[in-house]
Structures are given as C-alpha cells and as structure tokens.
Image (spheres, rainbow, N blue to C red):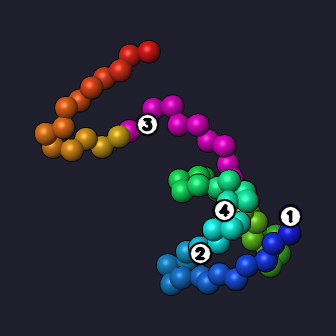
Amino acid sequence: MSSIEITKLSSRGQIVIPKSIRQELAWEAGDHLAVEMHGDRVILRRLNIEVQNKVVPIKKGQDLKVQSK
C-alpha cells in the first residue's frame, strides 16, 4: 500500500491530496483529519466524527420542514 505522489503547498498552507490516494483511502470532502508531526514527517489520519445535530442553512423563501423520529 505504499504510494508516492508529488503535491505543492499553497501560500495559504493548503495541499491537495492526490485523487488516487483519496480513492484508495476512501477519503471524501468534509472528512476530518488529524495532523501529526513526527520529526520532519507529517502524518494525516482520518477521524471518525459523528455529527448529531447538523445545522443546515435555509435560503430566504424556502419552506422549513421538520422531520420527527
């Protein structure tokens, strides 16, 4: 499972994780990641965080429908 790809650090401190690696790890947009530093290495690990009360923005004029469980 060893894979090497080249990416670049942006001026805002952002990197792009190559699509092939994201697919192999099943990482998706919005996933939470832990960032660990070990010497000169950075390790990223996906965190399993459950969101119980999700806040969804409502647009002006949109009907609000509340679903009960």
In the rendered image of this protein, does residue 34 appear above or below residue 11?
A: above
Residue 19 location in percent, x, y?
63, 68
Q: Is 13 on the left-hand or right-hand side of 26?
A: left
Q: Are marks 1 and 3 in contact (CB under 8 Å)?
A: no
Residue 7 location in percent, x, y?
65, 81
Q: Which marked residue is nearer to the observer: mark 1 or mark 3?
A: 1
Residue behind mark 4: 22
Quarter of the image with the C terminus in it: top left
Residue 43 location in percent, x, y?
76, 66
- Tell which residue pokes out farthest to the top in this image: 69
In the rendered image of this protein, does residue 38 appear above or below residue 30?
A: below
> Mark 4 to mark 3: distance in Å?
25 Å
Residue behind mark 1: 1
Q: Which marked residue is nearer to the observer: mark 4 or mark 3?
A: 4
Q: Is 68 on the left-hand or right-hand side of 22?
A: left
Q: Nearer the viewer, residue 27 or 23?
A: 23
In the rendered image of this protein, does residue 19 appear above or below residue 4?
A: above
